[in-house]
Structure formats: C-alpha cells, structure tokens
Amino acid sequence: MSASRTERLLNLLIALLNTKYGLRRSELREKVYHDTTSSDDAFGRRFERDKVELRHFGFDVETVTDPGWGSDDPATTRYRIGKESNRLPDVVLTPAECTVLLLAAQLWEQAALGSAARDAVRKLQAAGGLADAEPPPGVQPRIRPAGQAFEDLVAAVHGRHPVRFSYLAGSTGNEEVRTVEPWGLGSRFGQWYLVGYDRARGDRRFFRLSRFTSAVEVLEKDSFTPPSSFNVREQLATLPELPVRQAVVDVARGALLGLRKHAAPAGDSADASDAVPPRPGFDRLTVPYRDAETLAEELASYGARAVVVAPAVLHTSVRRRLAAAAAFAAAPAPQIDFPEHAPAKRVRKRTSEDQLKRMLQLVPFLVHNQGLHISDIAERFGISRKELEDDLRILICSGLPEGYPDDLLDIRWDDDHVYILEDLDLKRPVRFTVDEACALLAGLQALNGLPGLDEGGALESVTLKLTAAAGEEGLKAAAVSGPEVAPKDSATLDAAREAIGAGERLHLEYLSPQRDAVTERDVDPLRLYSLDSTWYLEAYCHLARGLRNFRLDRIQGLRRTGVPAGAAAAPAGGFPEKLFTPTDDDAVVVVELTRQGAGLADDYYAERTAELPSGNLLAEIRFGSAAWLPMFVAQHGGSVRVLEPRALAEETRTWLEAALARYEPAPAARLD
C-alpha cells in the first residue's frame, strides 16, 4: 500500500462513516478519488479493492439500494459504513480485572502476538475501559513461542493459507515434506503442536514444531476452510502422553550432575547394549524419557561427555544434530558486515498499511489522553517522534470530501503536547482483530493455576467480558492455545515469594550447569518470573556480587536466613526483559543463524543483526560464558554457528568433531 493510498483510504473511511444515507460511486470518484482519467471499469476495480482493504481493517462497507432498482447499477447504489458495526463494544473493567488483563497481555514476550497484545491493550485504553494497574507483586510469567515457525504458522492459521515444511516423522524416523492446512496451534506436554489437515494423507494430523527440519513456507496463493467451531485445546486434549522409556547412556565419570539427578545405574538386563561394556572413565546410566527428540537435544549439548548406547533411534537423533552442527560450522563463512546503527532485533519493515492501522488507533487514543507529550505518545506506540509527526500531518489533512476547515481532523501539537479537537467519528476504537483477540484470550487461558490469582474471580470475569467484546474474532481465537504457566512444583516458588515479601536473605544450594557443580550462595531475592512453566528467581548474588537469575528447578535447597536483604538488591526498573544480566566479562559473539533458527536472535537478545544474501541472519550476542557456546551450537543442530571470535569458532568446531567422533561407529559396534 503506497502512502498516497493510505491517505485515500483514510479519507474514504471518513466519508463513508459520516454519511447517513450513503454516497454513490460517482460522488466518491469525484470528491474522494479525484479521478477524471480512468475508465469506469478500472475505477470500479480500484474501488472494490479499497472496500476489501477497509474490511481488512474492520470496517464493513454497506450497500444501500433505492427501492425498485438493482444493486448492479452504480448510479442507484449508495455506500456507507455503519457507525456501530465495526466498533469495539464498551468494556468496563474493575481494577482487579485490569491487573489480570495486563498480566495476560505481557505473557507474549516476543513475536507477533506480543505486538497484537499491545495493540489490543491500546484499544481498551482508548475506549476508556482500562485503568492504570500493576502486575501482581513479585510474579511475572512469560510465554516464549517456538521460534520463527510459530510466527509463520500463526499467520497461516489466521490467513487460512496452507503451509509446506520438512518434518521428521516420529513413527518412521524419516524426514518427509508435508503440505498441511493449518487449523490450529497449541501447547501440550511442554511442546508446541500444529493441528491440521495433511493433504497427502487425507486426514487430520498433529505435528510437533520441534520436529520441523526446515523453515515453514506459507502458500499465500492457496486457501482453505477450517472445520467450524474448531478448538485447538480440545483437539490436543485427545493426544495421549507418550509412555516412559529408558535410554542407556554412557556418561563421563563425575560429570553432568544435572543428568545424573534423574538417572540411575544401568541394571543387568538382557539389553543388547550389555554386549558392549562402558568405555574407560565412563559410567553406564539408565535415563528415563518420553520423547526421543527432547532428550536428544539435551544429550547433544553434552558433546563427548555423554554417548547414547540405546535405543538406536535416540543414538541416530543425537548424531544427526551433531553432524548438522559440525557441517554448518565447517562451511565457508560469510563476510561479516553490520550496517551502521544495525537494529538489535529483526524488525519487519513498516509499511503504509501499518501506518493506517496505527493512525486508526492513534485518534481514539488521543481523544482519551488529551495533552500527552509527543515523545510519550511515540514511546507508547513504539515509533520514533518523526514517524508520529508524519502520522499527525496526514491526519490533519484528512476529513470530509471537499469539506470546510471544520470538516477536517483537528490535531494540535505546537507546544509538544498533543490535543485533538475534532475526531470525525474516529474516537472509538475498531473491534479486535483475530490476532489481538487471540493474544488476550489465549493469554488469559494460560494464567489458570498461577499462584496468587483467584481463578473464580477476576480471571474468569475478565475472560467473559473480553470474549463477548471480541465477538466472531474471539471464536477464531480458539485456533491458538498457549501453555499453562503455573509452576509444576510451587513449594520453592512459595518460599521465595514469602522471602521477597519479608525482604529476607535466602541461602541457596544451586546446581550450576556451566560449572557442572552444586554451589552454595546467599542471595537477596527480588522477584519471580517465568518462560512457559520454567520459573526463575531474580536475586542479588553475594557470591557473584551482582544480579543473577536462578532457575527454580535447579535449586537443590533453599532456606530463609533471617537476615534482612541488603540495599544492593534494589532492581533498576520493571520486570526484567532478559534472563541474562550483562557484565564487563561477557563474551561478545557473532553468530550466523539459518531462517529456521532466526528466532534465536530475539531469544538471546541480540545487540545487532543483519540479513545475509543467503537469507540467513548475522547476530551479535552477549554470552556470560564462552565455554557454553559449543553446547548452545550442538543443541540447535545446524541452525546456528559461531563466526567470531575466530578462536572461539575454531574451538567450537573442534568440540563438535570430538563429540561426533563418539558416535562412530554405530551403537551396536564397539564404542571405545
């Protein structure tokens, strides 16, 4: 959409909103389009495209026909937009409901649903139904979507476009190309699943996103119709949990304490692995697991310190990850060139469509927030001051066809405080889009069971109110379902919350995976937050002399000391956006990410990014420990490699080669 088309659509919208009886096509052509050169057919096609575009923004153009005349006669057909049909209904929320809603909106840490949640909150603020509120003290859950595949699949689900991807079949272990009509996307058993119609197999299938071995291709020229009243959570509830299986793994003696915590010495079963004794310096352990791919991701990150003996499918899965990582690491390196002022995040180029969408939010926001400073408004909308001023300049030139000055939008900001004096019936927000309804409703659903929330109170009531306000779009939102963010074991969380509330120091016994050791430390607890159901304690660590984030499931012991927390424990601002506290000792690393792994740039808070001609992504990321980098590369199996520093890239290649050598020959042969 060009900038001129943005202005034209805005003026067309205002004209159709502010006519009681409707405007004929000839009137619109003369007064809005100022079109005197194109043919009637060409103008008709242009007008129909604009009607579709307005419908995309939530405005349905009504056709009014004079009695006795046919609707196919442009001379007797008039057009208008009903003032109520497209507007967000009034939503009045109590302070407790506002708190729960903000908690749900903040769940989506990254990705398109995060932007959609912010847009939805702005609409509620513009309607005057959302009071200022703060999240519950000490707790902030987050959902981390499953990378770029999640982004692409959400767009395909809501756009109703088929998708194509390569997939590692769990039943056969073979990699296959699938073409699927995506009905819904949801989380179960700690994994994200796509539910859809597999065109080659002619039936519904479930696809786990961690088994995707390629980027998702959205077939935008094709479309489909999903089943009516589809609910992905109900569909995923039919999935049986995988049975517990046993893997036989040789582990370096004295290493990998975290793995040993869940393992046991291998017994004297008649397993085929007994034919090959453990290598010198290794212990043979039995590791319980439900899914081979999940365990393979963990075991690959251990490199040469762990080797799968059985089953063969797990051995193959780990070897495949290590081989892909080693091959990518050994490939010719691209030229490293970050443009000046390279963005920290991958930012989709803003279009004039984004601008029109933003302006439609901006007018009602200004009506209900008169006199805000222009910089504050720009910050609220996540744009620069220049972009905001460009929006305002377009708005003040928009209005009724050939109207007088009083028929134009009247916005003033001469003293840097913005006031709107004439809104031309744009003062009420447009109804929720599918993405916006999905972000809020799926977020509220994920909060069930969260400590500190009354499920039968504000959470239930705000869900009912927003479902009613979302209407048909709320029904479509059932195509996406997030994970429940309640912790699996709330005892440690409850103890930490009590210490935070009392301002009391804690003594921790903590399993550090990087050190591969249990350390004891005193910490001043600050707050708790999560990614999905994995919870973290942010605290000032007296051992490290700085802020640190501790995973609750790695805390081996926790006790209150009775000592007041020190003044050094005061956090700098709101809830942390990162699970990593930068220091001067960090390793600054340049990595290359494939399109499949591009989401890691956001997950690990890249400081700079740049696209490569191949479609891959350069990212500059800080890591607290360079020693952890080979594990990170192996875990993601061919989606990421280290480019700089060169010495670290070489160390990573050597580490991967040593790990891969452990998997040659096959497990049935001798391993040492």
Image: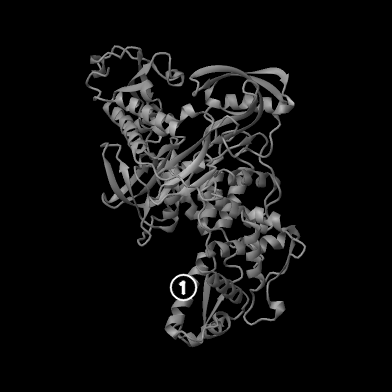
**Residue plotted at (47% across, 26% down):** 627
Residue at the image position 63 percent from the left and 65 percent from the top: 390
In the foreground, 478 or 308: 308
Identify the image quadrant of residue 323: top left
Q: How far across and how far down the image is residue 416, in percent?
A: 75, 61
Q: Which residue is mark 1?
A: 49
Q: Residue 188 appears at what percent x and percent y?
A: 44, 38
Q: In the image, what residue type sits under mark 1?
A: Arg
Q: Position of residue 463 (x, y in %)?
A: 58, 48
Q: From the viewer's perspective, is 104 left or right of 498?
A: left
Q: From the viewer's perspective, tell me whether residue 657 is left or right of residue 41.
A: left
Quarter of the rendering occupied by the C terminus? top left
Decide: few, some or many residues near mark 1? Use Cα within 10 Å; few <14, some 14-19, many ≥20: few
Which quadrant holds residue 265?
Answer: top left
The quadrant holding residue 273 is top left
- Name the foreground residue: 405 vs 79: 405
Q: Specify how the rendered protein is coloured.
A: one colour
The reply to whether residue 425 is in sight is no
Name the residue nearer the viewer: 602 or 266: 602
Q: Is residue 106 above or below residue 256?
A: below
